Image (tube, rainbow, N blue to C red):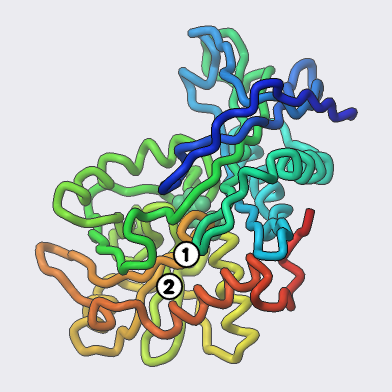
């Protein structure tokens, strides 16, 4: 397939001041359409609205998936993408779960590199900032009726972003949710399917009203084991052993999660993927054996957890401060992403 490039004639004003997360979008986007059994009309074009009919299938049945990855520009002007291929491969897995046709990963990765290169001047360079990359697919068949659509739009938009959380690396407060569930085995929770996020909002709002930043989700069947947090995977450090919930079909297989496991194992840390009962987390917080808790995800990278609320009680972790393993991984991962630390795993794709 050929890639057409249509440059904007009216470059936008770039934001000044705090970027926040996902508020500003660059001059261009990548788009391609799917009809009659194939992707076609791949193009980089000016960022612009889509025109969709009210009957468009995505509005009614939510057949849509997304991804999130980042590009970093360092002091030498080098532009670096972190494991972007893994995101596109995961996107095809998400798509497959809800009957969306796959994309050609190599073609799209090449288009992504060209798109980022074209909007390179939008990549922020301050500490903690990056260009957030959002690939999405939506179903666009103009007909009602629950079935897999015959038409789709794939697009990639770019958003210069600061820290995901308003308070940067400050520890977050989690609320352990025992009524609402995010994902059940056999459902779509281990894929980046849009409906998962709608399903999580009620609990998110409830936690926010009580003064918490994020929800800690438990398994759907017994509400016994910890699964993940908001849109992050979660890690616990008990007695110097790093533990994270094993992927058993209802947890999103995070690329940051995998990177943290690979990095810590490489450095000789003991890392276990296992079941983690919320009662053991509470016990550890009480007797001090739980040294650190942190979330991992592309948007926040590493997010230290300062305390969590469970059945009306609050439990402080690590004195409410960022722990030393959390700090170390944050420095290592962001170091590899920006080029401050050698990329010994081959995770970085340069433009
Ligand atoms: C995207 C996401 C994550 C983190 O995945 P990364 O690949 O590390 O960004 C974790 N949980 C959920 C529910 C997610 O949507």
Question: How far from the left and from the top, in percent, is residue 35?
Answer: 75, 17
Front residue of this view, candidates 76 and 322: 76
Q: Distance between the residues labelled 1 and 2?
A: 8 Å
Taking the image as drawn, is residue 163 in sight? yes
What residue lies at 28% left-to-right and 46% top-to-bottom?
204
Question: Upstream in the sequence, badge 1 or badge 2?
Answer: 2
Task: Say if residue 39 shows up in the picture.
Answer: no
Q: How many labels does the image show?
A: 2
Give the quarter of the image for residue 261: bottom right
Residue drawn where x is 44% and y is 56% of the image: 163
Q: Where is residue 168 in the image (x, y as percent from the top left)?
A: 38, 62
Q: Where is residue 278 in the image (x, y as percent from the top left)?
A: 28, 70
Q: In which quarter of the image is the N terminus?
A: top right
Identify the residue at horizontal 70%, vertical 47% (top origin): 88
Residue 235: image tag: 2
Percent of width and height locating residue 267: 61, 88
In the foreground, 174 or 27? 27
Mark 1 vs ligand 1: CB under 8 Å? yes
Q: Mark 1 sits on what residue?
A: 296
> Which callout, 1 or 2, points to the residue nearer the camera?
1
Q: Residue furthest right?
A: 2
* Up/down of 39 relative to 17, above or below: above
Residue 144 tag number? none
Badge 2 residue CB within 8 Å of ligand 1: no
Mark 1 and mark 2 residues within 8 Å of each other at the beta carbon: yes
Q: Is residue 216 left or right of residue 332?
A: left
Residue at 49% over, 8% down: 54
Classify mark 1: residues with Cα within 10 Å, few (<14), some (14-19) or many (20+): many
32 sits left or right of 157 in the view:
right
> Does 22 appear above or below 231?
above
């Amino acid at each position: 397939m050929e890639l057409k490039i249509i440059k904007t004639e009216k470059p936008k004003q770039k934001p000044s001041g705090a970027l926040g997360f996902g508020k500003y979008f660059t001059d261009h986007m990548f788009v391609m359409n799917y009809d009659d059994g194939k992707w076609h009309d791949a193009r980089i074009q000016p960022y612009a609205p889509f025109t969709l009919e009210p009957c468009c299938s995505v509005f009614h049945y939510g057949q849509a998936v997304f991804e999130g990855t980042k590009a970093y520009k360092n002091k030498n002007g080098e532009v670096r993408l972190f494991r972007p291929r893994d995101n596109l491969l995961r996107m095809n897995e998400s798509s497959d779960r809800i009957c969306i046709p796959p994309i050609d990963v190599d073609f799209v990765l090449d288009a992504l590199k060209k798109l980022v290169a074209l909007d390179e001047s939008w990549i922020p360079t301050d500490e903690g900032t990056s260009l957030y990359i959002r690939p999405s697919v939506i179903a666009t068949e103009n007909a009602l009726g629950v079935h897999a659509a015959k038409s789709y739009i794939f697009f990639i938009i770019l958003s210069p972003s600061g820290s995901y959380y308003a308070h940067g690396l400050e520890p977050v407060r989690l609320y352990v949710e025992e009524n609402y569930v995010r994902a059940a085995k056999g459902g779509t929770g281990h894929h980046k399917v849009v409906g998962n996020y709608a399903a999580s909002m009620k609990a998110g709002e409830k936690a926010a009203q009580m003064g918490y930043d994020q929800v800690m989700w438990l398994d759907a069947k017994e509400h016994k084991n910890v699964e993940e947090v908001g849109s992050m995977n979660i890690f616990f450090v008990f007695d110097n052993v790093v533990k994270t919930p094993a992927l058993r079909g209802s947890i999103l297989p995070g690329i940051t999660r995998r990177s943290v496991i690979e990095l810590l194992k490489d450095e000789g840390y003991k890392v276990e993927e296992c079941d983690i009962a919320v009662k053991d987390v509470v016990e550890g917080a009480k007797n001090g054996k739980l040294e650190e808790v942190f979330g991992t995800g592309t948007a926040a990278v590493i997010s230290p957890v300062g305390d969590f609320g469970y059945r009306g009680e609050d439990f402080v972790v690590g004195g409410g401060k960022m722990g030393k393993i959390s700090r170390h991984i944050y420095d290592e991962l962001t170091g590899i992403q920006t080029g401050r630390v050698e990329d010994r795993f081959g995770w970085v794709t340069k433009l």
